[in-house]
């Protein structure tokens, strides 16, 4: 079963459960503030979704959402604390599910996204893109591929860290097109973007939102996805341009401890759906170059399982080199 079949099944399951979910939401009435653990430092892409969510949550919930940043060990420190929290609905975690998944595949971790939590819902997505400096000779992906084939192993490309979403996406692109190039890791999206603009590398794989506000310095050649981004809608996808890719990205997902009851999870899912639909939420995210992208818990889980299957060969390749 491929990733599209999994997603269709999950959508069907979600549709069948819609009425019970709304009933549960009506019955779910949290009485205490809800701590939202963000397992990264403040200021990143995941943090921006969390801050926007808390800024508008009072339109949906009677209690506040409180952001608690718990960075460390590529997100595993905060995830471990969230998994151990009391399963009463007062502590949840918002994180890049793609990064969490890949980290748990690359090394032994105490917790994993598919085995240690209940997946509540997806509220957004950070999609990987291939970009070059504005003065790069590469006008299209075909130009880059042709040069990489002519000079195997000589091109240098940037990403935000080995084993992360953008690294796996970039390596998947190389594998799918039979190419070799030297990867150069940087710590975060901003340093990666600076390296591309400054010519330290020939191209880079990083979140498409990194191009927002830097249109004169960067040229985005393609989106590592089947469909275009709602904000950066002028960027064509790899699919449109006829290039194979590994469908990994960074869905922003809300997780709850494993033993949280069904009613609470259903109520949380419905609340996230309403928050994601608020015009105020969309406006805040647009200012950051992002957009809401809601998926139910079932849909988000199906997407993660499909991502795990696609990424597995690349993770095995990375492990063999370490």
Image (cartoon, rainbow, N blue to C red):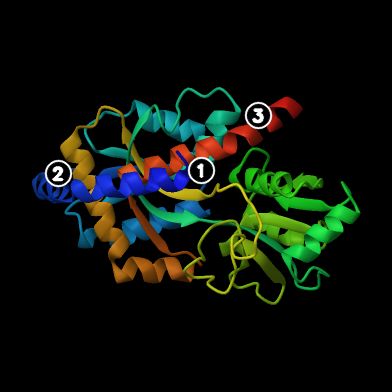
Q: Which tag is nearer the camera, tag 1 or tag 3?
A: 3
Cα distance between the residues tagged 1 and 3: 16 Å
Q: Is residue 237 found left or right of 282 in the rendered image?
A: right
Badge 1 is on which residue? 98
Instruction: Tell me where residue 151 appears, x and y as whole percent.
Output: 91, 53
Residue 31 badge = 2
Q: Quadrant of the N terminus?
A: top left
Among the two numbered marks 3 and 2 on one chain, the one whose residue lies closer to the N terminus? 2
* Element type where label 1 sits in the image: helix
**Residue at 77% in and 52% down:** 157
> Are discs 1 and 2 less than 8 Å apart at CB?
no
* Element type where label 2 sits in the image: loop
Q: Quick one: label 2, few (<14), some, or many (20+) residues within 10 Å?
A: few
> Are discs 1 and 3 less than 8 Å apart at CB?
no
Answer whether residue 39 is visible to the viewer in this image: no
Q: Which tag is nearer the camera, tag 3 or tag 2?
A: 3
**Residue at 66% in and 67% down:** 220
Cα distance between the residues tagged 3 and 2: 46 Å
Which quadrant of the view contains residue 32? Answer: top left
Cα distance between the residues tagged 1 and 2: 32 Å
Q: Quadrant of the C terminus?
A: top right
Q: Is residue 189 above or below residue 302?
A: below
Residue 316 badge = 3
Q: Nearer the viewer, residue 186 or 129?
A: 129
Answer whether residue 76 is visible to the viewer in this image: yes
Among the two numbered marks 1 and 3 on one chain, the one whose residue lies closer to the N terminus? 1
């Amino acid at each position: 079963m491929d990733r599209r079949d999994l997603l269709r099944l999950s959508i069907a399951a979600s549709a069948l459960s819609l009425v019970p979910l709304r009933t549960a939401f009506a019955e779910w009435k949290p009485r205490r503030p809800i701590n939202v653990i963000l397992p990264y430092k403040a200021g990143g892409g995941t943090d921006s979704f969390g801050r926007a969510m808390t800024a508008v949550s009072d339109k949906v919930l009677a209690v506040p959402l409180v952001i608690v940043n718990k960075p460390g060990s590529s997100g595993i420190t905060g995830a471990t604390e969230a998994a151990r929290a009391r399963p009463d609905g007062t502590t949840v975690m918002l994180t890049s599910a793609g990064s969490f998944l890949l980290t748990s595949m690359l090394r032994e971790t105490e917790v994993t996204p598919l085995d240690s939590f209940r997946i509540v819902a997806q509220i957004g997505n950070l999609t990987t893109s291939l970009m070059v400096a504005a003065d790069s000779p590469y006008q299209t992906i075909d130009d880059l591929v042709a040069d990489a084939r002519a000079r195997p192993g000589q091109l240098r490309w940037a990403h935000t860290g080995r084993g992360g979403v953008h690294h796996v996406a970039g390596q998947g692109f190389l594998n799918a097109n039979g190419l070799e190039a030297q990867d150069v890791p940087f710590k975060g999206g901003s340093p990666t973007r600076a390296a591309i603009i400054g010519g330290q590398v020939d191209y880079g794989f990083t979140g498409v939102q990194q191009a927002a506000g830097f249109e004169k310095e960067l040229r985005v050649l393609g989106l590592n996805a089947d469909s275009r981004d709602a904000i950066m809608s002028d960027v064509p996808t790899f699919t449109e341009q006829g290039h194979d890719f590994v469908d990994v990205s960074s869905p922003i997902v809300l997780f709850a401890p494993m033993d949280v009851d069904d009613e609470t999870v259903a109520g949380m899912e419905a609340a996230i759906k309403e928050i994601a639909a608020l015009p105020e939420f969309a406006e805040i995210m647009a200012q950051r170059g992002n957009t809401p992208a809601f998926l139910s818990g079932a849909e988000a889980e199906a997407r993660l399982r499909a991502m795990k299957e696609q990424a597995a060969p690349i993770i095995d390749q990375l492990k063999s080199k370490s």
